[in-house]
């Protein structure tokens, strides 16, 4: 996807109000979606398929230089199979598919008559667009077309200034190609204008394009389409599948200094005058991949989003009142790669399992809706849907669970619209109820559903296992996963908070907390003061607890996170960049434990990547196992220390091979722990996946007491975690 959507966000609402039918102008009349807009958002999931000639020469091509365009002979996807594309999309739950008929290079996937730079003149001699639409119809997928009107290397458009004569020539080419696309391939479900259409009178063609749309495609949904048309769709202002919350389909506008209307708030407005639904698009490879992940390039599988990643984005797109549009990059053979397709299928299977995980549902009119269970039932997710054909009316709500005769709040929110999904820690309830606290008119609840579903624990694609042929010292490390903690909140796709009273692996009764003398003595999953975020980091803190009477009884509280059942790996190098405060009694730690404990009746291993005590200016790195803990064996040596920067960031790592663990601090190796031939799993339990724990700890037999309470609060500031394999 080319990065010119911002222009359209500013111009999508340059609406000519006369004749506008997508919504009502007057605030006195309720603003409602068209029937097509209701149908569109009910689809929920679509794909946008990318294929362009530059994938055949990725190292030499430059969008700004026409002379780097690949020759037509380079385009030879000899196994091209549009059925395979569409079936892969369908396996992921997609109901519609958009193909990039003309992306940024100017190369066309249909036999355009405007110029010769198209698939008909390549070795395959095929109209790829026609084949794609045929496949869509064959498998019941609604077809759409992407055409970028602003960026075109072949014509030199969008990358540098154009003369008036060249602009006029280019505009005419665009007009003719759009007429070809819209008149020759039947009804298109969605038309994608990446970055919108230039609408100024001197150089724009929006007015002429509107005439074409009304003539050939009057019912199409138009992503960033020209002003004044029906069924306009808008962007969520990121390409990560993360719709901000709250989010409204209704939008409002102001008049700018050019006399045009512009969106006031991209999140929408519950009292907005226009209904413009939104689409959350993202590639199926992360932004570190070539072309931002939108176009395929060889040997970039490490950047693939997993099925868990896709599931997370389902919750933050569809679950936040928008559609989810997943990118698909076709490879040079003409196929959607097998690894990518496997993930799509796994994601689709997760959606099917979620649909089967509904415990009960209810619908109706009014401000309160209650689901009652026959017996106490575990729930961890709710879903709310309004009947949006009657408008988005809910403006504030809460959800409560009935536990032992008392109602307890378990979720709250603002906007709902087509769908609002919220996840929370599992709890057992006799009933749950939705209470609408603010609404513009009587709420019409299409569905209020309760679920018990674990989306990230059903399949094992969250476990990164090093390929066998690369398990050696000589193979170059590649980044395969990272978390930069820059979202402003914890990414629950990979992490959970740790709590002494709440985390199943270590849970104990509140009244017995004093019996715990270990590292989790003060750890809390519920106090927000011990886990904080800024734009770049997560802060795991140690604090004084000022309310031990009404709240948590412990005098101090700490924060920690772990990746059990969400992110694990076997072999590779894990690196963590951290800045550590000092205090007497402080014990921050980075460590790993076995994900599966596959060896019974023995310790399954522990890798302590970093432990620091008190005001020390060094850190410990240690290996634990049944050999060292239970049998008290000291050979081979299990730990060493290394110097750290006490005032700045340090990078702690362990490089994990099938025969050794190599620890380092800031790139300087501290100790290698080897696998001893013949010693067995007591000494080497490390041929299994491990998960990560990052936590701030206070007190214990090793660091001693917090003797200077004034040193608190302290912070363990984590910049990033990176896994290489």
Image (spheres, grey):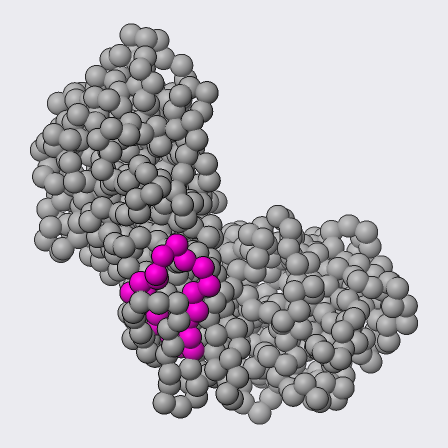
Relative image position of residue 667 (x, y in whole percent): 70, 53
> Hey, which quadrant is residue 171 in on the image?
top left
In this picture, is 99 found above or below 610? above
Relative image position of residue 569 (x, y in whole percent): 51, 67
- Give the magenta range: 432-452
**Going 48% across and 45% down the picture, which residue do you hit?**
288
In this picture, is 444 found above or below 137? below
In this picture, is 338 found above or below 657? above
Residue nearest the observer in this picture, 474 or 219: 219
**Going 69% across and 74% down the picture, which residue do you hit?**
523
Relative image position of residue 213 (x, y in whole percent): 17, 31
Query: Which image quarter holds the N terminus?
Result: top left
Q: Magenta segment: does it hold 259?
A: no
Q: Can residue 134 be seen in this view?
A: yes
In this picture, is 684 found above or below 20? below
**Going 35% across and 32% down the picture, which residue do you hit?**
12
Relative image position of residue 644 (x, y in whole percent): 79, 56
Q: Magenta segment: does it hold 448?
A: yes
> Hey, which quadrant is residue 559 in on the image?
bottom right
Residue nearest the observer in this picture, 690 or 353: 353
Question: Seen in the image, is 521 located left or right of residue 38?
Answer: right
Question: Seen in the image, is 619 located left or right of residue 209?
Answer: right
């Amino acid at each position: 996807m080319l990065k010119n959507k911002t222009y359209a966000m500013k111009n999508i609402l340059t609406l000519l109000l006369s004749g506008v039918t997508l919504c009502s102008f007057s605030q006195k009349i309720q603003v409602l979606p068209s029937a097509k807009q209701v149908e569109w958002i009910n689809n929920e999931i679509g794909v946008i398929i990318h294929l362009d000639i530059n994938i055949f020469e990725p190292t030499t091509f430059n969008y700004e230089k026409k002379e780097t365009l690949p020759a037509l002979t380079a385009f030879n996807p000899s196994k091209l199979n549009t059925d395979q594309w569409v079936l892969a999309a369908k396996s992921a739950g997609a109901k519609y598919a958009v193909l990039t008929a003309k992306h940024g290079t100017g190369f066309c996937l249909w036999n355009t008559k405007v110029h010769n730079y198209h698939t008909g003149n390549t070795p395959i001699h095929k109209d790829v667009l026609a084949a794609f639409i045929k496949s869509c119809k064959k498998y019941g997928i609604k077809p759409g077309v992407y055409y970028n009107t602003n960026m075109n290397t072949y014509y030199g458009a969008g990358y540098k200034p154009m003369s008036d004569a060249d602009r006029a020539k280019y505009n005419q080419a665009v007009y003719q190609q759009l007429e070809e696309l819209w008149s020759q391939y039947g009804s298109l479900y969605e038309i994608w204008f990446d970055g919108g259409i230039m609408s100024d009178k001197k150089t724009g063609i929006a007015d002429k394009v509107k005439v074409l749309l009304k003539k050939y495609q009057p019912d199409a949904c138009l992503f960033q389409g020209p002003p004044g048309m029906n069924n306009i769709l808008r962007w969520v202002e990121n390409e990560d599948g993360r719709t901000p919350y709250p989010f409204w389909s209704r939008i409002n506008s102001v008049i700018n200094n050019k006399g045009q209307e512009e969106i006031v708030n991209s999140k929408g407005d519950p009292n907005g005058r226009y209904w413009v639904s939104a689409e959350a698009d993202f590639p199926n490879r992360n932004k570190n991949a070539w072309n931002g992940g939108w176009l395929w390039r060889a040997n970039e599988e490490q950047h693939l989003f997993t099925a868990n990643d896709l599931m997370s984005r389902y919750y933050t797109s569809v679950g936040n009142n928008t559609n989810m549009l997943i990118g698909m990059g076709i490879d040079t053979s003409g196929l959607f790669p097998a690894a990518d397709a496997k993930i799509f299928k796994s994601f689709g299977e997760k959606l099917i399992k979620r649909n089967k995980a509904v415990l009960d549902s209810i619908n109706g009119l009014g401000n309160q809706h209650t689901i009652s269970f026959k017996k106490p039932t575990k729930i961890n997710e709710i879903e709310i849907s309004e009947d949006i054909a009657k408008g988005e009316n809910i403006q504030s709500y809460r959800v409560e669970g009935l536990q032992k005769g008392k109602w307890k709040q378990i979720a709250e929110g603002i906007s709902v619209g087509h769908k609002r999904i919220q996840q929370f820690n599992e709890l057992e309830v006799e009933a749950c109820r939705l209470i609408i606290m603010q609404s513009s008119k009587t709420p019409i609840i299409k569905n209020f559903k309760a679920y018990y579903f674990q989306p990230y624990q059903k399949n094992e694609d969250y476990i990164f296992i090093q390929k066998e042929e690369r398990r050696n010292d000589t193979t170059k490390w590649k980044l395969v996963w990272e978390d930069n903690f820059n979202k402003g909140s914890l990414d629950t796709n990979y992490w959970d908070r740790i709590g002494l009273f709440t985390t199943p692996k270590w849970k104990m009764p509140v009244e017995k907390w004093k019996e715990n003398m270990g590292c989790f003595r003060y750890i809390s999953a519920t106090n927000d003061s011990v886990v904080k975020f800024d734009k770049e980091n997560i802060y795991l803190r140690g604090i004084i607890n000022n309310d031990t009477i009404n709240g948590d009884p412990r005098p101090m509280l700490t924060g920690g996170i772990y990746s059990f059942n969400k992110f694990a790996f076997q072999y590779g190098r894990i690196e963590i960049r951290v800045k550590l405060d000092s205090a007497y009694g402080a014990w921050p730690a980075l460590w790993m434990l076995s994900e599966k404990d596959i060896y019974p009746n023995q310790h399954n291993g522990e890798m302590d990547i970093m432990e620091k005590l008190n005001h020390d200016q060094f850190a410990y790195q240690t290996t634990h196992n049944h050999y060292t803990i239970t049998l008290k064996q000291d050979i081979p040596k299990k730990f060493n220390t290394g110097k750290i920067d006490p005032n700045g960031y340090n990078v702690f790592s362990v490089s994990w091979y099938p025969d050794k663990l190599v620890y380092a601090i800031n790139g300087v190796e501290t100790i290698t722990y080897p696998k001893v031939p013949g010693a067995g799993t007591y000494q080497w339990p490390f041929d299994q996946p491990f998960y990560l724990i990052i936590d701030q700890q206070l007190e214990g037999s090793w660091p001693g007491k917090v003797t200077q309470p004034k040193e608190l609060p302290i912070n363990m500031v984590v910049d990033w975690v990176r896994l290489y394999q």
